[in-house]
Amino acid sequence: MSVSIAFEKAAAENRAALVGYLPAGFPSVDGAVEAAKAMVAGGCDVIEIGLPYTDPLMDGPTIQDAVHRSLTGGARLADVFRTVEAVASTGAQTLVMTYWNPVDRYGVERFAAELKNAGGAGLITPDLTPEEGREWLETADSLDLDKVFLVALSSTEERIEKITSVCRGFVYAASLMGVTGARSAIDTGAAGLVARTKAHTDLPVGLGLGVSTGAQAAEVAGFADGVIVGSAFIKRLLDAPSQAAGLKAVHELAAELAEGVRAGR
Amino acid sequence: MTIESALPDAAGRFGRFGGRFAPEALMAALDQLETEYDKARQDPGFQAEFQDLLTNYAGRPSLLTEAKRFAEHAGGARILLKREDLNHTGSHKINNVLGQALMTRRMGKRRVIAETGAGQHGVATATAAALLGLECTVYMGEVDTQRQALNVARMRMLGAEVVPVKNGSRTLKDAVNEAFRDWVSTVEHTHYVIGTVMGPHPFPMMVRDFVRVMGVEARQQALDLLGRLPDAVVACVGGGSNAIGIFHEFIPDEGVRLYGFEAAGEGVETDRHAATITKGSVGVIHGMRTYLLQDEEGQTVESHSISAGLDYPGVGPEHSWLNDTGRATYRAITDAEAMEAFALLCRTEGIIPAIESSHALAGALKVGRELGPDAAIVVSLSGRGDKDMHTAAAYFGLMPEEGK
């Protein structure tokens, strides 16, 4: 199963898909499963489960903090697959977002097989380019998994062509030049990047890095096929006085964003 | 100075090592750097300006000093110290930063950022930025800002902003992460002056080319002094820039043994060391495929060394390649062995070495005893030890209030 199904369903409803991100093991292994389920219940169409990594050099302070807590809490790879399995069982399309070394170390084929077995739809790989990703591309194709690579504001037309030609599921457009973290305003270059990307592919284009409110989600939904939200969910969990309050806050945010992706067109 | 070498290949690979495992947001900048560097290396004007700065600003060529009293402890082998400690700013790092600062200007960028461990690379970068009128921000692990406080003050005096990094292990690895984060969001006007032969292509190649002057000089100086090539060349290895710098010219000289000494910390049998090649495995970190310290699930394992400059869980990809081909041999030196060599050089030669370089000195003592009295060994004295006085004073109990 590909996440493209979730994007097609959203498109049929004339709206953008809502994609929520959460690292496995945060605030605990079970807590992450519950939070992801609350995100689905609130209206997320696709869930990205982050694989906690010691050197998250593409992530801002909020995700770094969550990942650090996850790792110091003892989260391991088996917990990531267990989380994927639990979230996928809700029926939501579930991807894993991971830096490359944990996959490389575990073995690309072995990792992909276990992901598939857990019901995962594929991988988002923020520090892997198609040039270095041949083994993953071949493995994903043989196992029928989604391959989501990133395009950036600084990407040339030539690179966008190269990247979109190997993606499956959707194309991840990084809207800000910077690392992830909730921002107050949506960068004005984002619409241009989505438009440039769509000129090269029929795949859906999801826009990530920056959205934290329903109004921002609506703005992004006006030009992108998917709205990706991560730090804002984590912040709700970090700020909550109790786990129950955190789940409630996550559910509310998902509902607000889900309303946003429906209001944008 | 002409620069010729077979590796890396067009994809930046040294055999199976190296490459470019970078976020897409940096690919345009890396492509630009590769293209511009390719032009610069063939541009006589660029090379002349670089050479002029090395000669008239950094103080090159550096001396090759024979250490006769120190050599008495090395099995009688002749020990020749390549005196990078005498360069402006006190280490080999100035060679690389002058090259990269010129590249920054050439690419029309106005700001440089850098990571630093011991602070030597940060000081060198702040120096070059001051010289060329560039803005400068240096990321330094909070632990390192404490053990190298004097260098923090030096950088600030030179006009640089020093940002203590409080994430993760709060050492060099985390400073690299933070510098990459900065670069991703400032790449239009900022160049990341990576401080060693690591990172995504073309950094390992470009940095090597800027530091290989060490070996070019040392080889000729050894020939002049000895009438022949040395038997061995010895250097410490953290990320590995001083080692590549002094090794590279000798690589075709098959009779010259190359030894890299990593930091064994409290011992390679403990979990507190930074012996990346000796104890690590192959993976991907900071944009390159190389040996690194990682667990079975690919999580980076924290390194340890008394020397901030060697306290890094990865190593430049060319070293991984030199190890696998057998051209160079990598071993590890403990904190205690390094500090013993540190004290020995002070007392026998009147030279205070950096603790990083002391790992090479300790290695030279071993290699000298193995090769015997007829051997001649070139040792990379990569930096001076002024910055390490606080650590040394505490280690040896030299301050009354800190005496044990």
Image (cartoon, rainbow, N blue to C red):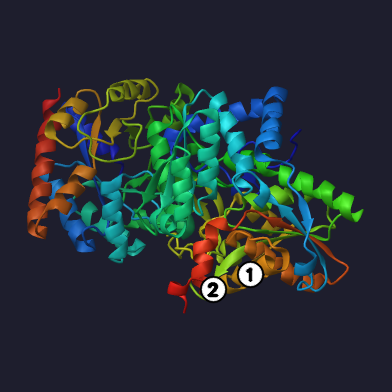
Q: For the point 88% across and 68% down, which residue is it?
A: B374
Displayed quadrant of residue B36: top right
Asked if residue B61 lies left or right of residue B338, the reply is: right
* Cβ–Cβ under 8 Å for marks 2 and 1: yes
Percent across and percent down for residue B253 are: 83, 52
Q: Quadrant of the N terminus of chain B?
A: top right
Which residue is nearer to you in this view: A1 or A85?
A85
Task: Tell me whether marks 2 and 1 sit on the same chain.
Answer: yes
Mark 2 secondary-structure assignment: helix
Percent across and percent down for residue A141 are: 44, 43
Displayed quadrant of residue A227: top left
Q: For the point 22% across and 54% down, which residue is it?
A: A87
The numbered mark at residue B343 is 1
Asked if residue B211 lies left or right of residue B299, the reply is: right
Asked if residue B354 lies left or right of residue A229, the reply is: right
Count the marks: 2
The chain carrying label 2 is B
Mark 1: which amino acid? Ala
Mark 2: which amino acid? Phe
Which residue is nearer to you in this view: A92 or B353?
B353
Position of B40 relative to A74 (above/below): above
The chain carrying label 1 is B
**How many residues crowd around disc 1 within 10 Å: few (fewer than 14), some, or many (20 or more)?**
some
Position of B239 relative to B27 (above/below): below
Which residue is nearer to you in this view: B142 or B39?
B142
Percent across and percent down for residue A25 are: 26, 60
Displayed quadrant of residue B41: top right
Task: Please report whichever mark, 2 or 1, sits nearer to the chain's N-terminal start.
Answer: 1
Which residue corresponds to mark 2?
Answer: B396
The numbered mark at residue A67 is none
